[in-house]
Amino acid sequence: MFRITNRMMYNNTLYNIFTNNEGLLKAQEELSSGKRINKPSDDPTGLNRVLDYRARISSTEQHIRNIDEGVAWLNMADSTLNTMSEVLRRAKEISVSQAGAPATAETRKTYAKDIDNIISQMVLLGNSSIGGKYIFAGQKTNTAPFASGAIYFGDKKEVQIEIESDKKMGISLDGSTLLTTDLSPDINGNTLLSSLNKGNGVASGSIKITNRAGNSATINLSGASTVSGVINAINAGGINITASINSAGNGISIIDNNSIATQNLTIEEVGGGKTASDLGILASMPDNIDGLDLTPNLTTSTPLSLLNGGNGLSLTAITVVNGAASGAISLSSATNISAVINAINNSGLNVTASIDSSGKSLQILSNNPSTFAYAKEVGSGTSASDLGISGGKNIIKTLTILRDALNNNDTNAIFGAIGLIDTNIDKVLGIRGEVGGRVNRIESMKGLLDQSNQDAVKQRSAVEDADIAKSASDLALFQTAYQATLQSAAKIIQPSLLDFIR
């Protein structure tokens, strides 16, 4: 016959108490948290699904925040462009009123001061910012893109936001395509070191390179005058590294060819110089070094193929106007800046073309102090605008042409400025349309993301959330069972001293 011992009764009673207590605690946890899954053991498979939903929701919410920021940027850009168009219309009113009688040389000089103020206003508009970030500076959002003289200090790279996984949209604008011209040349082997870093050049001196195998070489670059000179000197260092122009075409890359790596590839200054820094290669990297953008200025030897960030320019013809004289100039055979300048200077129109003081575009000046020279397009061409010698897509250049024409009492140039202002107004309106299109696209995407987020929240809730009615019922059931177990145990198990000593 099977004997039920006190130990068995104790164990069975404790098991029932613990089981009921565990169910009671779980029901209490579900009610207090509102969640069916509070730890992995509650539902391992369900927890994996919940984590997936949470990741989707977090990603979607971040994309929605990105879109809200992007819309704010674009709305700020649209408002600024609207103000620019109004200012341009004011400039057109002035040019029309001063193009003929009853305007005089005196009234034109007076209105030239108004145009000068308008130019200053345009520079301020070009430096518009939101949240401390400049919207017309490309990716250089911490740098004011325009200074006095309308020199552009931004870049042509676009600030982008991720609006969904692996899909981005640009929200910034390149001020050099609207307010002023930056021909933005890339570099090649013949690029002069003196033209790099916006014309500030490269400090003469030496650099020290230590490859990943631990071998070092000091490279004397004091005799180099071109990018090729730097590259050749580095490659002759004898430590199995290769210098070349980087894939972006705007800097120098250093590739370590050693198969064994014991440390970082390091480039240092020698003797407190700043040669490596000026060359954009001062770094210590576990892999190769991709040099910084060297931002060269134009030189007469700059090939047209390197302009516009390496995309090049395809020139046709321009018309140069100097007072009452004008003539068309073919630039289709030009291959570099020197050829463009020579074609203009040999046109017989008594003008001098040169690289302007910013080092970023060209300028045309009359050799006659009583006349004013400027360029305009031939037909539907864009060569004059592309070179920065007309106001076709260069608001500040257009306004400068108008101001100087008013000061010179040059009615021909004033009439010409009217057409350029119209072109600028059309350009601003076109960009506003583009900005509006971007806003519509990302706001449509936000609507889809909001719906997707709501669906994911519902799906997560279906898996994770507790059934409150069921949890409350379970709580009452387990409370009753727990109390009943305790009371039953108290009546069934009544130990005496004899039970403990036998």
Image (tube, rainbow, N blue to C red):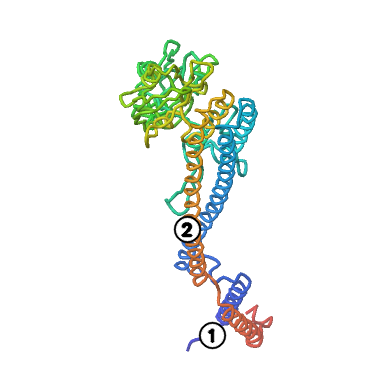
Q: Quadrant of the C terminus?
A: bottom right
- SS at mark 1? loop
Q: Quadrant of residue 16?
A: bottom right
Seen as rendered, the residue at the extreme right is 497
Residue 4: give its label: 1
Residue 445: give its label: 2
Q: Is residue 49 left or right of residue 329?
A: right
Q: Quadrant of residue 470?
A: bottom right
Q: Amino acid at mark 2?
A: Met
Residue 177: give its label: none
**Image location (x, y in percent) of residue 355:** 46, 20
- Number of callouts: 2
Residue 443 visible, this orientation: yes
Q: Is residue 96 left or right of residue 364?
A: right
Q: Nearer the viewer, residue 406 or 449?
A: 406
CA distance for labels 2 and 1: 71 Å
What residue sits 57% from the left and 82% below the top?
9
**Image location (x, y in percent) of residue 87:** 59, 40
